[in-house]
Amino acid sequence: MKLKFLKNNSPLGVAFDLFNVLFLATYSLLAILPFFYVIAGSFATTYEFRTRPFFIVPQTFTAASYIYILKSARLLQSIYISVIRTVLGTLTNMFFTVTMAYPLARKSLKGRSLILNLVVFTMFFSGGMIPTFLVVRSVGLLDKIGALILPGAISAWNLIVIKNFFQELPPGLEEAARMDGCNDMRTLWHIVLPLSMPVVATFSLFYAVGHWNAFFDALIYMQSMSKWPLQLILRQMITVAQGALGDAAMIDASYGTLPEDGVKMAVIVVSTVPILMIYPLLQKHFTKGVLVGAIKG
């Protein structure tokens, strides 16, 4: 019986199809296995990590790693900080990126080339960590959530891609909008953005993932531990679990021996699952947006 996925009739074509199927199946399995290992490891014991180098199903299930994470008094507060940062940061990023990309997409804008050159310049040269810290401190953003959002309000690369997308839109749409009495902001809001949902959803997801996963800027700018985001708290938990320097006061010391390797796996799960839940909501637009960014320039 001929398999449905074998499109060729010649022996050489069938062999080629079989090779492709086996190769892609093997590659997919190798890509998926680490995810299963991380999930299984988060429910495994320390003894199992020492006796089994690799496993998909743990012999002894334990929720000790998750209990250890949830016993942190600051965990819920850090999740709140991360959610607020991700939402406000993504909205800020998209607002400034879109409102800057839209006028730069117009070739009639005076000084357009100079502004674009300055944007490209920032992709290769930046002020550095210390000057950025001094600026953040001088404007009074130190230990405030604005320090995690405003310094990276616009990504130069994202700005250029969105600008190129706007340039590909039919100019007749904007001309028709002006004839109907729309100003630039109304044209952007009612005409351009509804047609740009794929690219808007794509870069919103990119910005959101960046904010959710970031921890280093919080380590520099946030002096109060009560304002630390989730990623920084989880990093501190791993440090405590390893017996290194860290604020052990945030953990209940009476809990006992901590499953160090299991905590690492559980931290990965806890910090990854929330952002993965957003992807199905944007999958339709995200797929189109990635394709658009690949073929338009």
Image (cartoon, rainbow, N blue to C red):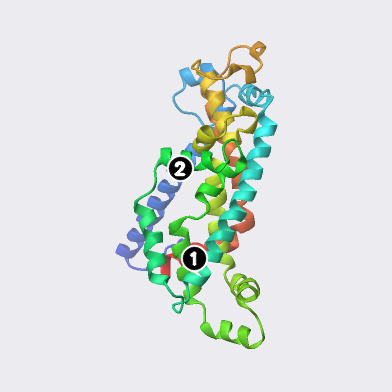
Residue 198 quadrant: bottom right
Q: Position of residue 23 (x, y in %)?
A: 37, 51
Q: Position of residue 239 (x, y in %)?
A: 51, 22
**Mark before the other along the chain sequence, 1 or 2:** 2
Q: Residue at x 67, y 84 (%)?
A: 181
In the displayed structure, 118 sits above or below 255; it is below
The furthest residue to the left: 12
Q: Residues within 10 Å of mark 1 (few under 14, many from 20)?
A: many
Tell me the amino acid under the disc marked 2.
Thr
In the displayed structure, 287 sits above or below 235; it is below
Labelled disc at residue 112: none
Left or right: residue 85 versus residue 216 is: right
Element at label 2:
helix
Q: Nearer the viewer, residue 165 or 295?
A: 165
Residue 141 quadrant: top right
Quadrant containing the C terminus is: bottom left
Tell me the amino acid under the disc marked 1.
Ile
Q: Residue at x 59, y 54 (%)?
A: 92
Q: Nearer the viewer, residue 32 or 137?
A: 137
Q: Is residue 158 visible?
A: yes
Residue tagged 2 = 132
Q: Residue at x 59, y 74 (%)?
A: 192
Q: Residue at x 55, y 49 (%)?
A: 150
Labelled disc at residue 162: 1
Element at label 1:
helix
